[in-house]
Image (spheres, rainbow, N blue to C red):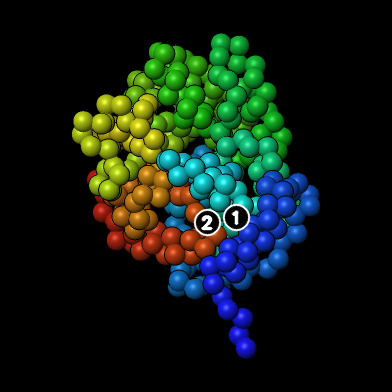
Amino acid sequence: MATPFNRRTFMQQTLLSSAGALAVPMAASAAQVKVTPTLIEKDVFGSKASLPTGTIGKLKVSRLLLGGNLLTHFTHSRDLQYVYSLAARYNTPEKILETLAIAEEHGINTLVIHTVPWALDVLQQHRKRGGRMQWIICSTAEVDDKMEAYKRSVQEMIDMGVDAIYVWGVRADALASQGRVDLIARAVEAAKQQGVPSGVGAHDINVIIQSEQNQVNADFYIKTLHHHKYPTGPRPEEIRDAIAEIPGYWCNDPAMVIDVMKDVARPWIAFKVMAAGAIPPADAFRYAFVNGADHVLAGMFDFEIAQDVQIANQTLAGVSRPRPWYS
C-alpha cells in the first residue's frame, strides 16, 4: 500500500533535506571542487553556440557578457533577504564552474566580476581546466591620493591573469560627487600602465559626464541602463532619492543616460539592464541595444544562459539604433 503523503510527512522530509544542505560549506575551497558533466543540453533553446563580438582594447568581447553578482551571491534582491542565502546554496564553486562552461558553449566569452577572493579562486581553476573565459574585474580597493592600495590591488589582478580592469562604480560615483575626477583618471592610468584595457564603472551619469569633460583616458565605460516600466519601478516623485534611498533602482534617469551616451565615442557595457530581475531579458536587451549600449552585462543562472543567448542573438539581428557601435 502506498505510504500516505501528508503535511507532516512533507515537513519531515523537507527538514531532513535542509539539514543535509546546511552541512555543505557555502564557499568550499576551489581546489576541492570536482565538476560533473552538465545535464543541460546546449541547444535546448535552439541558441547558436556563438555571439557577435565587439572590440575593447585588443579584446574581442561578446555582445552579451556574464555578470558576476549571482555567482558571488550579491543578488540585489531588494527586501527579499532569503534570496541571498538561496543564491549561495545554489551557486556553489562546483556550480560556478559548470556555469562558466555552459556560458562558453553558448558563445559568451567574457565575465565581469568583483574582487571576491574565493570566487576568483574558482575562476583560476576554470582556466586551469582549459577555460577561455576573459575576465573584466573591478578593484574594490580605496582610490585616494596615495593610490597605494589601488595600485597593489591592480598588480594582484594582473598577476592573476585579468584581461581588463575598471574602476568600481561605487568608488567612481563617490569620487565624482566629491569633485575628484582626477583620482578616477589616476586609477584608470594605474591599470593602463600594466598593459590591460582600463575602464570606469558608474551608476551616476555624472561620472561619465565629468570623465569626458576632463578627458579621462578610459578604454570603456560600464554604466547602468534600464527603463522604469516595471511594477516596482520608481515613480517620478521618487526619482530624486532613487539611488540613495530606495533599494532596487540603479538608473534613476535613463533618458539622460541615453542622451549623454549618444555622444560618447567609447565602448559602453550596460549593466543592471534587467533591474536585478524585474525586467524580462527580451525587453531589457532590446532597450539597451536600441538605446546605444555596445554590450550588455547580464547576471544569469546556468539554466538561463541558452535562452538569454538566443534572445540576444535575435535582438542583435534586428536592432536599429542611432548611436554608432563603438566596439
Q: Is residue 256 above or below residue 25?
A: above
How far apart are the two marked residues, 2 and 1, measured between alpha carbons? 9 Å
Query: For the residue carrying disc 2, how many other residues have a C-alpha within 10 Å: few (<14), some (14-19), or many (20+)?
Result: some
Please indicate, yes or no, whether residue 276 appears anywhere in the rendered image.
Answer: yes
Image coordinates for residue 97, horizontal then vertical, percent: 65, 55
Quadrant position of residue 247: top left
Viewer-proximal residue among 287 and 187: 287
Q: Which mark is on residue 278?
A: none
Pointer 2 residue: 301
Amino acid found under the numbered disc labelled 2: Phe
Q: Quadrant of the C terminus?
A: top left
Please indicate, yes or no, whether residue 289 appears anywhere in the rendered image.
Answer: no
Q: Which mark is on residue 90?
A: 1
Image coordinates for residue 167, horizontal then vertical, percent: 51, 28
- Asked if marks 2 and 1 touch (Cβ < 8 Å), the reply is yes
Instruction: Write the residue at 27% across / 38% down.
Output: 234
Instruction: Write the residue at 48% across / 61% down.
Output: 304
Numbered disc 2: secondary structure:
loop
Among all residues in the image, which is located at the extreme right? 32
Of the image marks 2 and 1, the number of the one nearer the N terminus: 1
Instruction: Write the residue at 60% across / 69% down.
Output: 9
Q: Is residue 201 above or below residue 313?
A: above
Instruction: Write the residue at 68% across / 52% down.
Output: 22
Numbered disc 1: secondary structure:
helix
Among all residues in the image, which is located at the extreme bottom? 1
**Numbered disc in front, either 2 or 1:** 1
Amino acid found under the numbered disc labelled 1: Tyr
Quadrant position of residue 2: bottom right
Query: For the residue carrying disc 1, how many other residues have a C-alpha within 10 Å: few (<14), some (14-19), or many (20+)?
Result: some
Q: Is residue 163 above or below residue 127?
A: above
Image coordinates for residue 257, horizontal then vertical, percent: 29, 34
Among all residues in the image, which is located at the extreme left? 236
